[in-house]
Image (cartoon, rainbow, N blue to C red):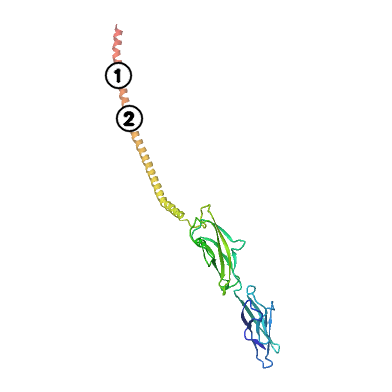
Amino acid sequence: MAEFLHSDYEFRVEEERSTGELVGQVTAIDRDLPPYNSVIYSLLFHDQPDVFSIDASDGTIVTCRSLDREITNYFRFVARACSAANTCSTTHVTVHVTDINDHAPVFLFPVAADNNVSVTNRFRRGDVITRLVAVDADVGDNGRVEYQLVDVDHVVDFYFRLDYVTGDILARQDSSAVTGSYTLVVAAVDAGTPSRRVQTALTIVVNISTSGKPLQSQPNASSDDNLAVVVVIVGTSLPVAILLLAAILVLLRNRARVERTAAVTSHGVYGSKLSSEGAATNQEYATLSRARTSTRLAAAVTVQPRYDNHSQV
């Protein structure tokens, strides 16, 4: 019986290779004695039977056509080994298609239909004006993209700089005076060997600001300071206001107490005065009454004799 040495085999082959490229070899052994130990190899495919072929006598696997990793990055199939007695065994084969640097980067921005950006002239140093975006269909270093400025003149270099990793185009310095249109030639380059590159043009249009606001919303230091001052004032004044209010309430309470005490005292004095004055008046009235009574009696005594003398005549 023919038996494979391994239950699984893995091989790697570069993409874009020509037909007949060696992939690898599988091996099975029949322990019978010759001529009964011969082995015949074949491949069993679930799909794409024209991709690989195997040498029936030695198990060597080769490509039947060029492979493209960007379409299919691996293949999996079954290899079979049969003995002269038609007893067979199988093994799984995986072929990984490795990448070569067969693609150049492609710009998503800027592109022919969208290759300009407009900003106001209120940008600050470090503000992101725009961002270059490029992709590469390859993997690893072959697909790692960096950015470059090409043929930079002194005016562009004075106002703008490029982050070669992120693709950000940033303001090199604060500026509110610059206006106009600036064209930058930019390139995207992959890290493959040899590298591939693509370049295009980007136009930055700087307009006069009408709002006075900067390009990006940056923290306003003076606003923060003013807010801090207000917080400090409020935090300081609130306790003072509370203490002042408490003092006013105490003063009002004391004043009310004093007024009540004064009212009670005045009422007592006035009542006593009225009582004293009433007693004096009563005494005077009694004296006056006694005096009037005495006067009347005296008058009566004086008139009586005159009346008697008249009677006698």
Q: Residues within 10 Å of mark 1 (few under 14, many from 20)?
A: few
Assess disc 2: are there few (<14), some (14-19) or many (≥20) residues with their C-alpha within 10 Å of its C-alpha: few
Where residue 84 is drawn, which disc sits there? none
Q: Determine the secondary structure under disc 1.
A: helix
Front residue of this view, candidates 78 and 198: 198
Image quadrant where residue 114 sits:
bottom right
In the image, residue 255 above or below residue 284: below
Residue at the outermost top position? 313
User: Of tags 1 and 2, which is closer to the observer?
Assistant: 2
**Callout 2, which amino acid?**
Glu
The front one of 248 and 189 is 189
Q: Position of residue 201 (x, y in %)?
A: 58, 63
Name which quarter of the figure residue 269 lies in. top left
Q: Secondary structure at mark 2?
A: helix
Figure disc tally = 2
The percent position of residue 296, horizontal first and vertical second, equals: 31, 18
Q: Which residue is mark 2?
A: 277
Pointer 1 or 2: first along the chain: 2
**Label 1 to label 2, Cα distance in Å?**
27 Å
Q: Which quarter of the rendering shows the N terminus?
A: bottom right
127 to 136, vertically: above or below:
above
Indicate the position of residue 190 as horizontal and vertical percent values.
56, 71
- Quadrant placement of the C terminus: top left
In this rendering, position of residue 260 left or right of residue 191: left
Identity, as a three-letter code, of the amino acid under mark 1: Thr
Q: Image quadrant of residue 41? A: bottom right
Q: Which residue carries the number 1 mark?
A: 295
Residue 213 on image: x %, y % = 51, 54
